[in-house]
Amino acid sequence: MATVLKIVAGALLLIVVAACLVVTIVPRFLDRIYYEGPESGHFDGARFFNPDGDDTMRMPGGRGRGGFLWRQLTGDDGRPEWPTSVPVRATKPAARVEGERMVATWIGHATVLVQTQGLNILTDPIYADRAGPFGLGPKRVAPPAIAFDDLPPIDLVLVSHNHYDHLDQAVLKRLWQRDHPRIVTSLGNDSVIAQTGAQATALDWGGRITVRPGVEVTVTRNHHWGSRWFTDRNRALWSSFVVRLPSGGNLFFAGDTGFGDGQWPSEAASLGPVRLALIPIGAFRFAPGQMSVGSHIGPAEAALVYQRLSASRGIPIHWGTFRLSYEGYDTPPRMLDAAMRCLGGSGFAGVPLGQPQEIAPATSPSSKTAMTREAMLRCLDTPAVRALR
């Protein structure tokens, strides 16, 4: 009996020691110091933050974190059905598009191939089957619309932040080994990318780098957050980008973003006319009727971003590839159409995966007064929009 008690006591002691180790060691192990530098208006010396207010910490839908994660894993939240797979007609793009002509092909999620000025530009490339660590996370329902081996030689890669559905280490490694592209990202993400053997240039908001004469990338503000583990939240910065081109207008890539103060699109527009804007519209609904969350704009706010950019053409991204939220599969583009009617504008509508889009040169920006978010939501308060799940 005494022996049994000793064994039980020893086992309990081991459990207590293990629990203490988990509490004290594991969080530090999972934490990462991706960046060290001076404090700034969006870095407190340890972590980055949104200077226009941090509303990205609240759980989407306003309920508890544990319940949210369980509902996401089980799908037990009354969400609309999604297709398990979406047929995609894959395409093989041209090797190069020279001169002022611009061609853009949506590959899936936030991955777009933009070809112009003899450059091949790739945004947030993700070819993984699941958006998460260790083979976990949401499974993609639409395969990449350009097979990796059919990608032309990539010259420039833009990586907006370190979430798994935007920073895919495996494909960045393949791209680096094959093409050695210039990879541009925001502060701290170069550390994550370096784990693959690839090299990236990491810049703060407002930082710029010349890719070649006449072509310059500026890292610009947006409203989001970053993490790859549990305790490394906001150790690396998030961003949008402006690719300044010698003629025809600029390329704007919003990355992944909430609306925040709504001023950051105008900041990007101040760098020159926007020929093409790549703007997210999905993963905005985590409760019935919700129109946005702190870290993700929905179609209503995406239309406002498009207007504030004074963009000539827009392609909606970040929808229909991975199921990350509550809304129905095709709700984002349908709601975007309604939002654009509210603006009385055009040029920003869904495009098919894999279908190359000819992008005309930028035109003179509209002089219309920017619509407020409140006015947009009033305009969208119709039976047809309310019926969208």
Image (tube, rainbow, N blue to C red):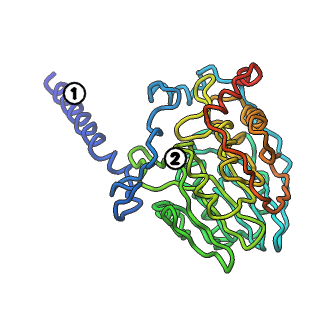
Q: Which residue is mark 1?
A: 8
Q: Quadrant of residue 338?
A: top right
Residue 288 vs residue 361, the one in the foreground: 361
Of circles 2 and 1, the one toward us is 2
Q: Amino acid at mark 1?
A: Val
Label for residue 292?
A: none
| Residue 84 in view, yes or no | no
Whole-percent x, y for residue 185 in the image: 55, 63
* Mark 1 Cα shell of 10 Å, populated few (<14), some (14-19), many (≥20): few
Q: Which residue is mark 2?
A: 224
Residue 275 to residue 283: above or below: below
User: Which sits earlier in the primary sequence, circle 2 or circle 1?
Assistant: 1
In the displayed structure image, the side of residue 231 where residue 74 appears, left or right: right
Whole-percent x, y for residue 138 in the image: 62, 38
Residue 23 vs residue 68, the one in the foreground: 68
Residue 330 vs residue 181, the one in the foreground: 330
Determine the secondary structure under disc 2.
loop
Residue 258 to residue 6: above or below: below
Q: Amino acid at mark 2?
A: His
* Mark 2 Cα shell of 10 Å, populated few (<14), some (14-19), many (≥20): many
Q: Quadrant of residue 130?
A: top right
In the displayed structure image, the side of residue 76 where residue 340 appears, left or right: right
- For this orientation, the residue located farthest to the bottom is 213
Whole-percent x, y for residue 93 in the image: 84, 62
Are the residues at dot 2 and dot 1 in contact (C-beta closer than 8 Å)?
no
Residue 139 to residue 354: above or below: above
